[in-house]
């Protein structure tokens, strides 16, 4: 598609034009000189993801929009420097691959897997500061900015952390590179379920996996080519993170073949708190070729979103925009239909994805941020229902999850209670689904695709 043409539509864009717009959610770096020197270093560093890989995701999202594939995006709310390890990366991948296998097999649909991985280190926050026992400190903004510990040194933004985020993203990507490059051969590795041996969901999962293995064996006996084909699809994986720290994002933006690409990831998304026509984030995103997620939450300004879509996707390209709806189970019935109406009226090309996590957060005992599994499933069901009764399609889902056996979201098959939250509450940001709850949701999504799509 004519990128020259696209830039003609936004003549004033350049990698730094966002600096002339409304800057939201940026940390105050105390040592500006040091910050500038770090940004300069990042500007020279190698790309993590290349244009052909980004264009490939765009093509796959086109298929998602056309209903030929289903999108599964998920991972941590925030990746953590402290939990960075080979095992934790492998386990996170495993969950997404298991969910995708359950959904693909159970509902006979191809899936596109995108991780909130390899760069999801920065967080938007509602408050600038946090107060505990009368002491007020800067809020935690993700490991690429400061530390979660509650003391002044830890909470002071430190630009060296941006470099660490880059290096950790690179190392994460290095581990998953054979998958991304379709060179990973041992599929069974992802299906091993020792983590769920104790669970009531084990039987259903075990049965699904046995059936998948049987089908693959069958395909193998009739043709080697088919097996190769299924392996190729199974291997496919993409990465994503929130486009938040614009200094970092623009330092890693590269010019190839007359176009600009954010070379740190395949897809970036615009958060609920920075989604504003005049925001620096919208300006930056309007100049890059990557697919872009847009979070849509309660009190959405439809006129503003309409203008944002015209600015970010002026040629109305397919596979470019993923609308990630996160209204909450209470607001979705009121908010989603007018949004669908606006998009349909304008014939905007979008992928419809549901994030049933962020609109269902509440605080228990003034201490534990949590989400109720029933509210999560309810929002998903309503999302599918509304699309089922409209000309649009439920195209995908967006989750925060962890392979660990945490107690952060209440409910689910083991019925975690609010009074159990303290048992294994480990998140530094939002409450995540544990492994068991994630698998349970994959079965629910399978059923929803089968009945409501
Ligand atoms: C997130 O995805 O972690 C997030 C902060 O979401 P939102 O912008 O939808 O609140
Ligand atoms: Co979150």
Image (cartoon, rainbow, N blue to C red):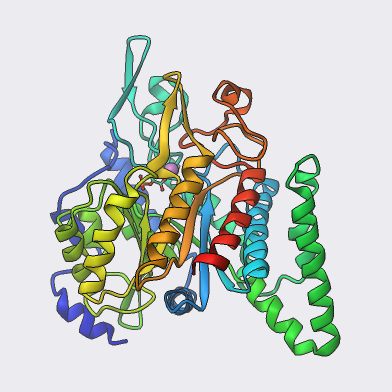
Q: Residue at the top extreme?
A: 133
Is 331 on the left-hand or right-hand side of 443? left
Q: Nearer the viewer, residue 12 or 314?
A: 314
Is 52 on the left-hand or right-hand side of 402? left
Q: Relative to 346, does residue 1 appear above or below in the rendering?
A: below
Regarding ligand 2, which quadrant of the image does it lie in? top left
Query: Can the viewer see residue 26?
Result: yes
Residue drawn at (49%, 75%) of the image: 53
Q: Where residue 273 sits in the image (x, y, percent)?
A: 27, 45
Residue 136 sits in quarter: top left
Q: Where residue 89 sits in the image (x, y, percent)?
A: 64, 51
Residue drawn at (24%, 53%) of the image: 275
Q: Nearer the viewer, residue 264 or 79?
A: 79
Q: Where residue 380 sits in the image (x, y, percent)?
A: 47, 53
Q: Where residue 240 sits in the image (x, y, percent)?
A: 46, 59
Residue drawn at (26%, 78%) of the image: 316
Q: Nearer the viewer, residue 214 or 128?
A: 214
Q: Relative to 72, does residue 378 appear above or below in the rendering?
A: above
Q: Relative to 75, does residue 29 appear above or below in the rendering?
A: above
Residue 262 sits in quarter: bottom left
């Amino acid at each position: 598609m004519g990128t020259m043409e696209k830039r003609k539509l936004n003549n004033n864009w350049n990698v730094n034009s966002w600096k002339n717009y409304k800057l939201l959610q940026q940390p105050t770096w105390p040592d500006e000189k040091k910050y500038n020197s770090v940004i300069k270093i990042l500007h020279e560093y190698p790309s993590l993801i290349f244009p052909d890989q980004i264009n490939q995701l765009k093509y796959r999202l086109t298929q998602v929009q056309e209903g030929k594939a289903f999108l599964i995006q998920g991972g941590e709310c925030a990746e953590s420097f402290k939990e960075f390890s080979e095992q934790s990366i492998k386990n996170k991948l495993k969950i997404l691959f298991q969910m995708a296998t359950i959904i693909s097999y159970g509902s006979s649909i191809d899936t596109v897997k995108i991780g909130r991985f390899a760069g999801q280190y920065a967080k938007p926050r509602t408050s600038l500061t946090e107060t505990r026992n009368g002491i007020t400190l800067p809020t935690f903004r993700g490991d690429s900015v400061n530390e979660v510990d509650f003391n002044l040194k830890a909470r002071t933004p430190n630009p060296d952390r941006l470099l660490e985020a880059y290096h950790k993203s690179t190392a994460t990507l290095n581990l998953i590179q054979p998958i991304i490059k379709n060179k990973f051969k041992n599929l069974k590795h992802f299906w091993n379920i020792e983590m769920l041996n104790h669970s009531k969901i084990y039987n259903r999962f075990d049965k699904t996996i046995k059936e998948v293995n049987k089908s693959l064996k069958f395909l193998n006996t009739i043709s080697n080519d088919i097996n190769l084909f299924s392996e190729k699809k199974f291997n496919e994986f993409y990465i994503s993170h929130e486009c938040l720290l614009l200094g970092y994002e623009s330092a890693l933006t590269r010019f190839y073949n007359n176009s600009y690409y954010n070379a740190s990831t395949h897809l970036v998304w615009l958060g609920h708190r920075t989604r504003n026509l005049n925001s620096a984030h919208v300006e930056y995103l309007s100049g890059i070729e990557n697919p872009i997620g847009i979070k849509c939450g309660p009190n959405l300004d439809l006129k503003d979103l309409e203008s944002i879509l015209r600015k970010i996707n002026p040629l109305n390209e397919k596979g470019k925009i993923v609308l990630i709806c996160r209204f909450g189970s209470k607001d979705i019935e009121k908010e989603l239909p007018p949004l669908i109406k606006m998009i349909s009226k304008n014939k905007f090309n979008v992928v419809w994805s549901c994030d049933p996590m962020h609109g269902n957060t509440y605080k228990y005992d003034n201490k534990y941020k949590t989400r109720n599994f029933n509210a999560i499933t309810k929002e998903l069901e309503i999302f599918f229902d509304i699309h089922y009764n409209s000309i649009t399609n439920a195209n995908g889902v967006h989750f925060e999850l962890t392979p660990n056996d945490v107690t952060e979201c209440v409910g689910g098959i083991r019925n975690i209670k609010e009074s159990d939250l303290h048992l294994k509450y480990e998140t530094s940001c939002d409450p995540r689904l544990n492994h068991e709850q994630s698998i349970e949701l994959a079965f629910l999504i399978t059923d929803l695709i089968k009945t409501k799509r």
